[in-house]
Amino acid sequence: MSRLRRMPRRRSYDQYCAAARALDAVGDRWTLLIVRELLAGPRRYTDLHADLPGVSTDVLASRLKDMERDELATRRRLPPPAAAYVYELTERGRGLLPVLTALARWGAPALDERRPTDAVRAHWFAVPLLPVLDGLLSGPAGDVQERGVVEVRLDEGAFHVRLGADGPVYGDGPAQSPDARLVLDADTCRALSEGALTVGEGVRKGRIEVSGEGVLAKVLRGE
């Protein structure tokens, strides 16, 4: 008679509280940052490790297994010729986007000084910027009225955000055919995310350059 394989029970706060239950699943170090990376879409283990400087291979592998067990992420094999395994978020995992955007807004003031030891990737600015851009395009009910892709160029590199998207909400690197392009620096991006500056103010003050001729670019320019 075969024995069912049991996954080890993870540590729990053992509290009948929604916040405690959430922290049971995502409260471990690195878990939410893995979610941040997977919001860009399916990623290989090596790509995740490269964009999570400081995480050990053992810890990353352990967190990914925990996320699979808690149904936050899945692992699948890409078809040939790639034949590689990738991790991607489940619907429940993608539901953590508002959590991350709230954390990013709360933590933005702590970015007033970049430490010499700080690693940086351009796409890390995508999550805090998303609600800012979505807010410009949302109707009275909060739904996004205009959908499209905005490419963002910083000194640190480029990324793109997909406004109104049902799947991955951002991507690393330039977009293939963006509906609008923003050029700004990291300090301006931080000011936008913490609410100290609006996109319109940034454009008028020359801190943000918007290019593109479509509806999305015109909204971002305030036209």
Image (tube, rainbow, N blue to C red):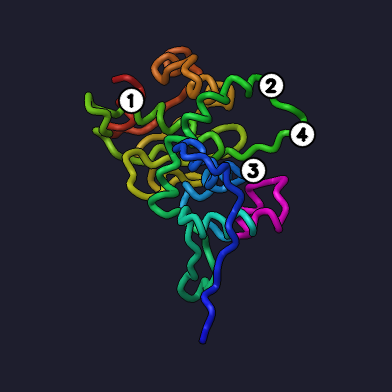
The structure residue drawn at horizontal position 46% and vertical position 37%, both measured from the top left corner, is 17
Looking at the image, which is closer to me, 202 or 37?
Answer: 37
Q: CA distance from mark 4 to mark 3?
A: 19 Å
Per the image, the residue denoted by label 4 is: 117
Q: CA distance from mark 2 to mark 4?
A: 11 Å
Q: Main secondary structure of the magenta part?
A: helix
Per the image, the residue denoted by label 3 is: 29
Secondary structure under the numbered disc 2 in the rendered image: loop
- Labels 4 and 3 touching (C-beta < 8 A): no
The structure residue drawn at horizontal position 48% and vertical position 76%, both measured from the top left corner, is 80
Q: On the rendered image, what quadrant is the C terminus found in?
A: top left
Residue 41, compared with residue 205, is above or below; it is below
Of callouts 3 and 1, the N-terminal one: 3
Looking at the image, which is closer to me, 76 or 65?
Answer: 65
- Labels 4 and 1 touching (C-beta < 8 A): no
Label number found at residue 211: none
Answer with the quarter of the image where residue 26 lies: top right
Per the image, the residue denoted by label 1 is: 136
Q: Which residues are magenta?
A: 45-60
> Please, what is the three-letter code of the amino acid marked with disc 1?
Leu
Q: Position of residue 30 (x, y in %)?
A: 62, 45
- Residue 96 shown in magenta: no
Label number found at residue 113: 2
Q: Nearer the viewer, mark 4 or mark 3?
A: 3
- Labels 1 and 2 touching (C-beta < 8 A): no
